[in-house]
Image (cartoon, rainbow, N blue to C red):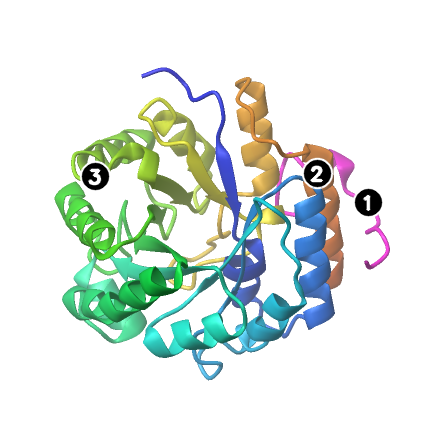
């Protein structure tokens, strides 16, 4: 296949990035961050998570964040939900898109959510059914697609099996995650090709972490396989507690720079994303992790 003419970027920093922060980020800051990302042209933004605040206290205000946002036509603000209880809370807050998460590694599933892969998928059946009845989109995540911190290598067939099940349950899109950033371009291509035999590539997304600095190479290796959706995190926010030195999702700034360098349209203004990155990292008290943003690093703009 040839390179896609356009790639949609799913910005996950306000959820996947901020949920790993050691301290609480003010609701006003989260809402301002989403607004800045939207002004930069990002139309799909994951803004929160309706998991138990006991386990993820940084996301305890997700309902308030969602209620304070005003999506325009074409905007998609998604939230993560672990089960039907989380889904109902998200729907009550006005969510029009939710995401569920499974793993391709049995050990990771049990360590991360205290449940088997089969058990986690059973939990999602009522969620996808309720979402379909309410006209709410559902996205599915598959973690450990390119490797597990406990089991090591993960068979592409295992990733394909979980992806196929998520699609069958009603997930509009399945995002394949390199949770600990251990994958290589060759591994990534083999995995995507295996999954694409069961789920059309136009329904797949790439969610690669940059722990070992290979995320951009892995993304580039998959761009001619028919996948045209990439998850990324502004300023490289986030991290992974399962890999020493993990630096979280690949930075949105770097992904946009890569795609624009390949003449692939994103609809995103790189300077605007860089500004959003400076805003949130100033609020967090550290510089952006994105090499693409480094030359533009400077004082943050005033709060919105």
Which residue was labeled with disc 1? Answer: 298
Image point 84% across, 51% down: which residue? 301
> Which badge, 3 or 2, is on the more N-terminal residue?
3
Q: In this rendering, is residue 101 above or below 275? A: below
The label nearer to you, 3 versus 2, is 3
Quarter of the image with the C terminus in it: bottom right
Marks 1 and 3, Cα distance to the nearest angstrom? 42 Å
Q: Quadrant of residue 202?
A: top left
Residue stretch rendered in magenta on the structure: 288-304
Q: CA distance from mark 3 to mark 2?
A: 36 Å
Mark 3 lies on residue: 195
Q: Quadrant of residue 298?
A: top right
- 152 over 125 or under it: above or below: above
Q: Position of residue 285 (x, y in %)?
A: 73, 61
Give SS at disc 1. loop
Res 294 label: 2
Residue ID at (27%, 47%)? 145
Inspect the magenta stretch and tell me whether residue 293 lies in it: yes
In this rendered view, identify the residue nearer to me: 25 or 73. 73
Q: Nearer the viewer, residue 218 or 10?
A: 10
Say which quadrant the N terminus sits in.
top left
Image side of residue 33 versus residue 148, left or right:
right
How would you rate the neighbour count of disc 2 (Cα within 10 Å): few for under 14, some for 14-19, many for 20 or more? some
Q: Residue furthest bottom?
A: 54
- Determine the residue positioned at 47% across, 55% down: 245
Classify 10 Å Cα crowding around label 3: few (below 14), some (14-19), many (20 and above).
many
Residue 141 location in percent, x, y?
34, 54
Mark 1 closeness class: few <14, some 14–19, many ≥20 residues within 10 Å: few
Q: Indicate left or right for 197 with 214 as reference.
A: left
């Amino acid at each position: 296949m040839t390179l896609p003419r356009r790639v949609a970027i799913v910005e996950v920093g306000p959820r996947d990035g901020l949920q790993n922060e050691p301290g609480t980020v003010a609701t006003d800051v989260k809402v301002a961050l989403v607004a800045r990302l939207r002004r930069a042209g990002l139309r799909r933004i994951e803004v929160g998570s309706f998991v138990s605040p006991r386990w993820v206290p940084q996301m305890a205000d997700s309902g308030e964040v969602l209620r304070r946002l005003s999506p325009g036509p074409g905007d998609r603000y998604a939230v993560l939900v672990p089960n039907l209880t989380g889904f109902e809370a998200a729907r009550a807050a006005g969510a029009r898109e939710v995401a569920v998460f499974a793993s391709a590694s049995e050990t990771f599933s049990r360590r991360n959510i205290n449940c088997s892969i089969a058990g986690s998928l059973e939990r999602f059946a009522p969620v996808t059914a309720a979402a379909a009845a309410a006209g709410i989109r559902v996205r599915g995540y598959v973690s450990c697609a390119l490797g597990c911190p406990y089991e090591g290598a993960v068979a592409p067939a295992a990733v394909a099996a979980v992806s196929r099940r998520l699609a069958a349950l009603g997930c509009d899109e399945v995002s394949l995650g390199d949770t600990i950033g251990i994958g290589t371009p060759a591994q990534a291509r083999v995995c995507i090709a295996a999954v694409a035999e069961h789920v059309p590539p136009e329904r797949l997304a790439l969610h690669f972490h940059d722990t070992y600095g290979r995320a951009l190479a892995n993304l580039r290796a998959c761009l001619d396989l028919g996948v045209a959706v990439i998850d990324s995190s502004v300023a490289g926010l986030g991290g992974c507690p399962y890999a020493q030195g993990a630096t979280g999702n690949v930075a949105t700034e770097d992904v946009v720079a890569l795609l624009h360098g390949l003449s692939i349209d994103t609809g995103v203004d790189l300077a605007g994303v860089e500004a959003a990155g400076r805003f949130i990292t100033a609020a967090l008290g550290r510089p952006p992790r994105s090499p693409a943003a480094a030359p533009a690093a400077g004082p943050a703009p005033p709060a919105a």
